[in-house]
Image: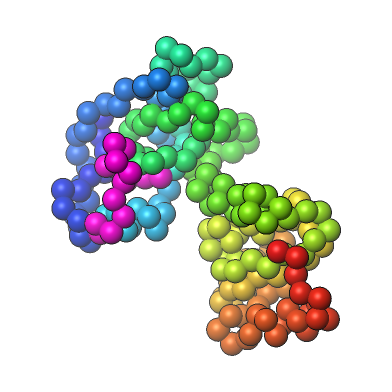
Amino acid sequence: MKAILFDEPGDPDQLYLGDYPDPEPGPGELLVQVHATALNRADLLQRQGKYPPPPGESPILGLEMAGTVVGWAHDVSGFEIGDPVCGLLAGGGYAQQVVIPAALALRMPPNLSFTKAAAIPEVFLTAFQALHWLSDTREGQSVLIHAGGSGVGTAAIQLARQLGVSATFITASAGKHELCRDLGADHTIDYRTQSFVDEIDQLTKGQGVHT
């Protein structure tokens, strides 16, 4: 298969399209034909030699992807050839094919393109964990989201609105405020010129936020 490779850490000029052995699904894994992948900061750091992949995982860049199922291990069931899926990876997304644990493969709704689906797993799962597992955010509560214009931030704004929060406060540079409001943020704070502590204290009349 073809993949985006690099032999030595460095700048983007180190990347090239080359040949790499086809992956084979192990126990509990799917084989997926990659249609789209996404760029994350971890990919940049790995290319620079600052963020090595976990031991035993693919050295190919790419932590998320969307594609179609083309095979699976003998112990996997419930999938058919051609099923569209997306998912989070330990590596390997910058290639024509990749293996992923079947339990981690997210089935794509029919109205979602591969390009959009490939950009969902990393940021939306991170935001979901922060809102549901770490903070247990609930309907009617208020939320403060730092870096609201980032990938995780924009995902968190949308998930918070789905939860039915009473108010969403975000910090972001002024140029990203309109985007954040379009996604559902109620109050935008420019962290470069304003103190978010003072602003939230004023906006909530000293009550603060729940999360």
Instruction: Magenta stretch: give its range.
Output: 48-63
In the image, residue 154 above or below residue 4: below
Q: Quadrant of the C terminus?
A: bottom right
In the image, residue 144 above or below residue 102: below
Prevailing SS of the magenta stretch: loop
* Residue at image point 81% right, 54% down: 139
Quadrant of residue 201 in the image?
bottom right
Q: Would residue 25 appear left or right of 84 to someone viewing this image?
A: left
Q: Would residue 74 appear left or right of 16 to someone viewing this image?
A: right
Residue 150 lies, in percent from the top left, at 53, 63
Residue 7 lies, in percent from the top left, at 16, 48
* Residue at image point 22% right, 61% down: 11
Residue 110 lies, in percent from the top left, at 62, 31
Q: Would residue 67 appear left or right of 209 to someone viewing this image?
A: left
Residue 45 makes an appearance in the image: yes
* Residue at image point 80% right, 61% down: 141
The residue nearer to you, when weighing 49 against 55, is 55
Q: Would residue 167 appear left or right of 72 to someone viewing this image?
A: right
* Residue at image point 57% right, 47% down: 125
The residue nearer to you, when weighing 43 against 27, is 27
In the image, residue 125 above or below residue 166: above
Quadrant of residue 161 in the image?
bottom right
Q: Quadrant of the N terminus?
A: top left
